Image: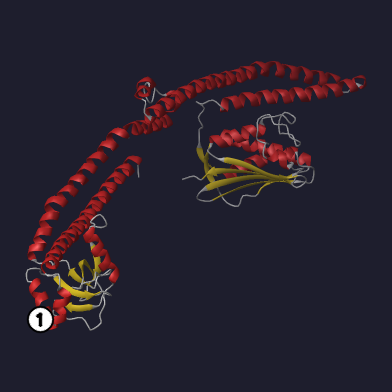
Amino acid sequence: MTVRLRLALTIFATGVITALGVLVTVAIAFQRFEHENVYERANAFLGRVVALHPDLLDLRARDADGFTAFLRNLLLFEPDTQLYLLDGDGTVLAASGSMQPAPGFKVRLAPVREAVAVAGDRRRAAYVMGDDPEHMNLDAVIAARPLRRTLIRAQAEPAGFLYLVSQPPSLNVGHAEVYRSTLAGTAMGGVLALIVGMTVCAAWIVATVTRPLRDLSAAVARAQREGFEGADVIGPAGAAARRGDEFARLRAGFHELLARLRAQWDALRRLDQFRREGVSNLSHDLRSPLTATAACLETLDRRWLGDPARVDDRALLEVALRNTRNAAQLVRSLGDLALLDEPQFKLRPMTMNIAEMLDDLVMRFADRASRAGVTLHNDSMAAVFAAVDIELFERALANLVDNALRHTPSGGRVTLRADGDRQSVLVIVSDTGSGIVAGDVERMFDRLYSGAGGDAEGGGKGLGLAIVKRIVELHHGEVAARSMPGQGTRVTIRLPAQA
């Protein structure tokens, strides 16, 4: 899910939640208004009753049965309302309803006193909820007025209370129509307008605020796709920077970073091109004089052969000839590695049986292995096919075999094996030679790395294993080594399987 879609969904969800909150708020406000309206009517009604009949307690004392009828007559025009006469401790003395409370039934006195206090000071509360003797499981809007008996001496506490309970009116057809018209006409219209407004706001934010982010994402993708050599992928930074917002500054910073990286990349590319050309030219220029020097040394060696007076000179000549040949081999390896590093260098892959290539290598190095007293054999059990550049890959394997023979003493063994499955092809060259110390194994394929075990070429400072690694990389493969001093070395080449 993209950032733009998440923003749009977040804003839309916020609008829906806000709309639901508005509906709940309207419902609560409507209920509060209804309660306040009921309380106002009840409080005004009690005020009129107490003003006209201040001696209610005395009336009830004189005629209890007639007082109940009197209360009912007072409520002829007040449906869903019940009137009660309470004594000072909340005991119901008389009730207007058809169901009379049991003798001694009491209501909570705290809401009654609160209703009396609110009637005297409306700043306390808008309405009071209290007990309904007919429905004790429900709270109802109540109103109360204190009553006193007609005595000469004033009373500190009221002798009783006139207590009025108002239940919400039942939902009849008329009320349902009022609610429906209110919600559908006003509330729902406002909610729909809010949702539409939030949707428009979401669209505006997504289209306007996140457009620079979309452009920057597209620019990053284009830079990743085309690299540093393509055209300007994000345009001039000045116009974006002048806008001053975070996205503009981010875009300008990315533009500057990309420009700096492009400049550094161009410099590195020029240096790398100069290095490759220099190494190639140096290899070409040194190859001829080294070859001529080796030829001259070989001629001297043949002339001095059998001359007792030249024994010491021939010893020095052999050292010079050996180092000249190593230098010539190193120069050739430098040229080959520079060629392999060229960006335009392309492989010429052909599908072939790797096991047959290993057989050819065994035949090629058989004479040398025999002279060294080393057993060389191909341990492949079946044909294994892979798409390789035959000349290059055979050279990589030859370098590994040459290196293994160089470091395997007489009586040792060098084993070649090809194996594979649907995912990869494995080519393994293992020996029982002197092995390599742990610190050198991880770096043995580095260029010109001089380890304790030396290298196949150059007397410990060659490029044979570096060429192996480069050839394997060109085949989109991996090369790894495992070795322990005195227990031999195992080099594994992993190539993609032939589809």
Residue placed most toward the observer, 296 or 228: 228
Count of marks placed on residues: 1
Task: Tell me which residue sits at (90%, 22%) in the image.
Answer: 312
Residue 368 in the image: state x and y as whole percent: 74, 37
Q: Is residue 353 visible?
A: no
Nearer to us in this view, 7 or 231: 7
Comparing 267 with 164, the one in front is 164
- Residue at the location (11% across, 62% down)? 176
> Percent position (x, y) of residue 249?
40, 27
The type of residue carrying mark 1 is Gly
Relative image position of residue 253 (x, y in whole percent): 44, 26
**In this rendering, position of residue 383 left or right of residue 331:** left
User: Relative to residue 222, is residue 148 drawn left or right?
Assistant: left
x and y, in percent, of residue 45 in the image: 13, 64
Quarter occupied by the N terminus = top left
Query: Which of the pair 60/69 is nearer the observer?
Result: 60
Name above or below for residue 301 compared with residue 24.
Answer: above
Residue occupied by mark 1? 66
State the scheme by which the image is colored: secondary structure
The image quadrant that residue 127 belongs to is bottom left
Left of 433 or right of it: where is 361? left
Q: Could you classify mark 1 by the number of other residues whose Cα lies within 10 Å: few (under 14), some (14-19), or many (20 or more)?
A: few
Q: Secondary structure at mark 1?
A: helix
Please indicate, yes or no, whether residue 300 appears anywhere in the rendered image: yes
In the image, 451: left or right of 275?
right
